[in-house]
Amino acid sequence: MVKKVVHKNYILLIVAIAQFMVVLDTSIVNVALPSIYKSLQYTSASSLQWIVTAYTLAFGGFLLLGGRAADLFGRKRMFLAAVTMFTILSFLCGVAQNPTMLNATRALQGLTAAFMSPAALSIILTTFKEGKERAKALSVWGAVAASGAAVGVLLGGILTQYLDWRWNFFVNVPVGIAVFFMAWHYVPESKADLDHNQLDLPGAVSVTVGLMSLVYAITQAPSKGWTGSETLLFFGLAIVLLAFFIWNEARSKHALMPLRIFKVGNVAPANVAQLPMVAAMFAMFFFISLYVQQILGYSPVKTGLSFLPVPFVIGIVATNMAKIVGKIGYKIPIVTGALFVSAGLFYMSHITVDGSYWTHVFPGLVITALGMGQIFISVTIAATSGVPHHESGLASGLLNTSQQIGGALGLAILSGIATSTALSYAAAHASDASSIHASAMAAQVHGYHNALLVGALFPLITATVAARFIKVYDIKESDVPAAL
């Protein structure tokens, strides 16, 4: 009996480390972006954002497919294969010699993460019994996953400053090798008892390539023109592929994303509410990381430390959300949390060339984090409340998917705004070369200002959708996920 418990704890440790790597890689590169920009000679912030976007789009686009593959072909088998490829691709990201190679390997890294993450979660669900045992395991899983984003910013700064930006990717190699051998030894094989082994590959490929085409069109429009032939070509391709995806999901017997799920509970409004919220959050981390390094002159380590108030405040707020949601429900925290995030971004949109962290950044980070702490748990409860037990896995998987896709699309839109407005500003002040307003730095900050200002509007969409469309179901405090 003791041996079994020890093995369960080993299994939890193994898959939690794997999930930590997956989440870490969404944030660890943010602080390294300026170094990568110089090293690989990226042309603009809109092209630089593909380092983040390529990973998150591939991750989000194939997440549901990864979960289904784990059920069909064996959770341990898919986990081991995904960890192997993730480790190899991390090394290839680290040795990238140009933007194209890095963007491509980041996309493939996101693809393997989409198979690794749901396989890891499935292993936990099949290892730990439903009830207190599973709840405790999921609390550990969630805490490790949540800490990955926070640790990523600081670790990215340390590795970039004292080693090299490439170590942001190399760090996964020894960890991945250790996880593989531990999983091979301790994790048992399991698969779902299904009457078919069909994967919806057309659905997964069409939605991912369609979204990538849409993001590419948005990022190229500022330089190529919104009515340019290349822009229109990729917009058209995106429309065709996404239309095919919807058609395929409506008729497929084993659809990747059965459309019926959107008629259940709060699945549709909760996912719609989350998209603009995550879009704003991704953009905030992206632009503020660039601002504090390129404008305020912070070192990578100091940049990582400057973001620590965010997880600290989120942790304080989130620990109290279980009781709050149990008393007043999840609808009010979503609305108020969205308003806090909007206010935080609006505050930070007033950054200046001669600004300071404590005056122009810190208060905005704290206000934004107050909202994020309210929303994380509340929107998850809303998305799964009223959902039958046999559909809960699909509902939660869809929420994770919309999170990644929302972040990628939002970052693409706001990067396009930042680039186009920076170019316009530079052109308007080109004649006054002696003025600080004519400098490239001033134009850059002007672009960040407009991107954050538009980003501040996104959470207002979240608040409106939540207030108008999210239904309130009876919940108990015990139904609320453990605060992270």
Image: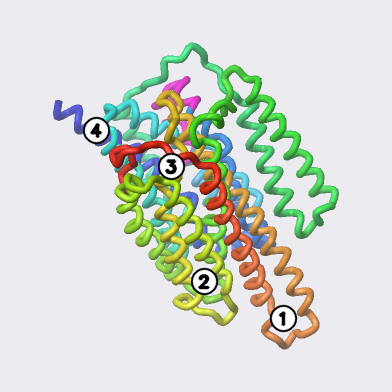
Who comes first in sequence, dot 4 or dot 1? 4
The part of the chain drawn in magenta is 68-86
Which residue is disc 3 drawn over? 380
Q: Residue at x 66, y 50 (%)?
A: 100
Residue 110 visible to an observer of this rendering: no
* Depth order, front residue of 462/344: 462
Spatial CA span between label 2 and label 3 = 32 Å
| Residue type marked 3 | Thr
Residue 5 colored magenta? no
Q: Determine whether label 4 and label 3 are within 8 Å by CB.
A: no
Which quadrant holds the N terminus? top left
Q: Residue at x 79, y 49 (%)?
A: 231
**Callout 1: helix, strand or loop?**
helix
Q: Where residue 133 is drawn, which disc sits there?
A: 4
Who comes first in sequence, dot 2 or dot 3? 2
Residue 327 pos. (x, y %): 32, 47
